[in-house]
Each structure stands twice: as structure tokens, then as C-alpha cells.
Image: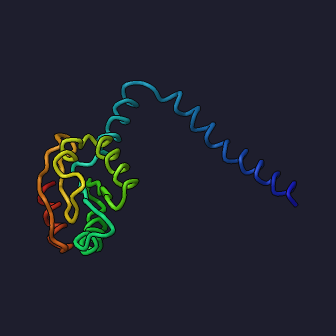
Amino acid sequence: MAKRTGSRMGMAAGLLALPIVGVGLGVIGTTGVAGAAETELRAAAAMPKLVVAKFHADWCGKCRAMAEPLDAARRALIEEPVLFVTYDFTDESTSRQAEYLASVLGQSDVWDEYGRRTGFALLINPETGEVVSRLGTPDADAIESAVRGAL
């Protein structure tokens, strides 16, 4: 039985590799200015125009109250170029990860000013790192309206 499963896996891996090889060969033939411009356009389209950063801890009552409204706003804004992130200060491990995330996102100044406080969300311009607005309301419509207004 193990041998049969192994051969199926090998066969599946081989089949999966075929499209990858084909794509790889296609990429070689599509170099040049048009290909570079298309790649640049896709990268620009994938960049958010706004970051909604929730400052959260599991033990924070305001954080728990904001969870569902923020999630509802995120779902309502699915077509908008908005990145929702959570800086989680529940414990030392999550706090360390939150600090790393802020650094990767270029939000060290925001971290220095707001880090380790909880119960709110910030709207941040990802290009400048500027805080556009601070949200403390657990109301999905108000959050959605503030985000749309900041775009």
C-alpha cells in the first residue's frame, strides 16, 4: 500500500511540474519593456493605499468590542486597496512579532508613539507612515466610512 501511495505522489508531482516548466519557458520569451511595465503595474496595483492597524490584546475589553466591527469593515472593503493588520500585545511573544511587523511595514515611528497601547486602530498612509486617523469606535459603519474617507 505504501508503495502505491508513493507512486501516486510521484506521478502527481510529475504532473504538477509540467505546468511549472511550461510557465517557466513562457517567461523566458516575454522579456522586454512591455513585460517590465506590466510587472510594475501589477506591483503598484497590489500595494495598499491605506493600512488599518489594530492595536490589540486578548485581555483588552475595547479590543474585543472592536473585533467584529473591524472584521465587518474589512469584509465590506474587500475591493479597496486596504491592508488590515493587527499588532497583538497579548503576551511577550506576540508583542515581539508585532514589533517585527511594524518594522517590516516601515511603521517604526508609529510603533514608537503607539506601541503596547491597546483598544484602538490607526489608519496609516503606507507611503509616508503618517497616521491619518485614530479609530476607537466599535461601529462597523463608522470604521468603513472613515477608511473610505481616508482613501
Measuring from the top left, give residue 89's x and y in whole percent: 31, 58
Measuring from the top left, give residue 93's x and y in whole percent: 40, 53
87 and 122: which is toward the camera: 87
Q: Quadrant of residue 74?
A: bottom left
Q: Does 21 appear above or below 142?
A: above
Q: Is the C terminus in the top left, top right, bottom left or bottom right quadrant?
A: bottom left
Q: Does 62 appear above or below 56?
A: below
98 and 131: which is toward the camera: 98
Q: Is the N terminus in the top left, top right, bottom left or bottom right quadrant?
A: bottom right
Q: Quadrant of residue 126?
A: top left
Residue depicted at x 85% and y 57%: 2
Residue depicted at x 17% and y 60%: 147
Measuring from the top left, give residue 81's x and y in whole percent: 26, 53
Residue depicted at x 13% and y 55%: 150
45 and 5: which is toward the camera: 5
127 and 101: which is toward the camera: 101
Q: Quadrant of residue 133?
A: bottom left
